[in-house]
Amino acid sequence: MTRATKSSSKKLAPPQTLSAAKRKLALAGVPATQARKIAASEPVAPKNKRGRTVKPLAPERVSAILDALRRTYPNVVCALTHHNAFELTIATALSAQTTDVTVNKVTPELFRLFPTPKKLAEAPLAAIEEIIHPTGFYRAKAKNIKGAAQVLVERFHSEVPQTIEELTQLPGVARKTANVVLGSWFGIASGVVVDTHVQRISRRLELTKQEEPVKIEKDLMKVLPQDRWIQYSHEIIHHGRQVCVARKPRCADCSLERECNAEDKTWTSH
Ligand code: SF4
């Protein structure tokens, strides 16, 4: 697989080089007791009369949030199982409206039978549908991933391209999937992955007031240093799965608690 060569965007070492044990650890994050210690070492974000943070985008506050995230989720990586850019592209496209766990259950068989863009492009639609059925919306997804494989073969010599503009030419690949592939496989920070967790938690942390993913991404690209674009999403996604869940966030176990003045906090130290 060809790695990133020339790009004006920021490139980082791909995290797939982590050993299986380290990968498991990275996916888990630190225990709640350690998260509380991290929170206790962070400054308290002052609130205004309406309970919102006085200067939510102040560089020192953003740094404190990023620092706490890094300490809580060291070396965190993408949870989708993959061995190359092609597999990651397809796995990410399949992950819409379902969990990474479900995707990881179907992709071994999918890539065993159709390991290359050419094989997937030539695969019978019904065979793809049967394999990916558990991921939901399987008819549309099967059509998209077969179509994506066809585009890879026809326009990109069966190689996954390394720009947002090219990646989004693939059926079923929008900015989010393109950012996942560029960041997690190629180590290219072209944008910020905005999924449901990044959307919810970036708003809770007052890093954006926007609601649409594209606008949220624009805000995050302004407020976060580019060399944290990739890891921020990984860390926040894990934080959203484990602690800052949609309903009843576990604020008492949150390492960002002192920086957070979210309206729906369930516990506060200040
Ligand atoms: S809402 Fe609660 S869990 Fe989420 S970031 Fe704020 S303090 Fe942490």
Image (cartoon, rainbow, N blue to C red):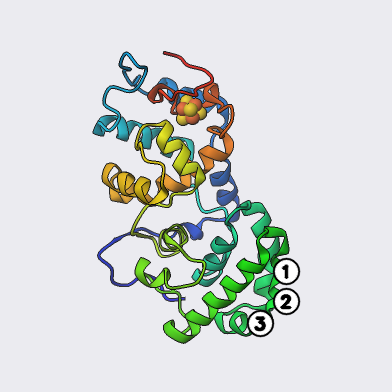
Q: Is residue 89 above or below residue 69?
A: below
- Badge 1 vs badge 2, beta-carbon distance below 8 Å: yes
- The x, y position of residue 257, in whole percent, is 45, 24
Label 1 Cα neighbours within 10 Å, binned few <14 / some 14-19 / many ≥20: some
Give, as a three-letter code, the residue at label 1: Ile
Where is residue 202? Give x, y as percent: 41, 38
Local crowd size for mark 3, using a 10 Å CA cut-off: few (<14), some (14–19), many (≥20): some
Towards the viewer: 138 or 177: 138
Q: Earlier in the sequence, mark 3 or mark 1?
A: 3
x, y (%) of residue 67? 37, 35
The amino acid pointed to by label 2 is: Ala
The residue at which mark 3 appears reads as: 123
What numbered label is drawn on residue 131?
Answer: 1
Q: In which quarter of the image is the C terminus?
A: top left
Q: How far apart are marks 3 and 2 (CA)?
A: 7 Å
Q: Position of residue 55 (x, y in %)?
A: 26, 26
- The residue carrying mark 2 is 127
| Residue drawn at the location 44% of the way across and 49% of the way down | 194
Relative vertical location of residue 158 with respect to residue 28 in this rendering, above or below: below
Q: Can residue 74 be seen in this view?
A: no
Question: Quick check: can you spot residue 8?
Answer: yes
In this view, the residue in front, 157 or 212, is: 212
Judge whether 4 appears above or below 257 on screen: below
Crowding near the residue tagged with mark 2, few <14, some 14–19, many ≥20 C-alpha atoms within 10 Å: few
- Indicate the quadrant where residue 208 lies: top left
Residue 24 against residue 69 in the figure, above or below: below
SS type, badge 1: helix
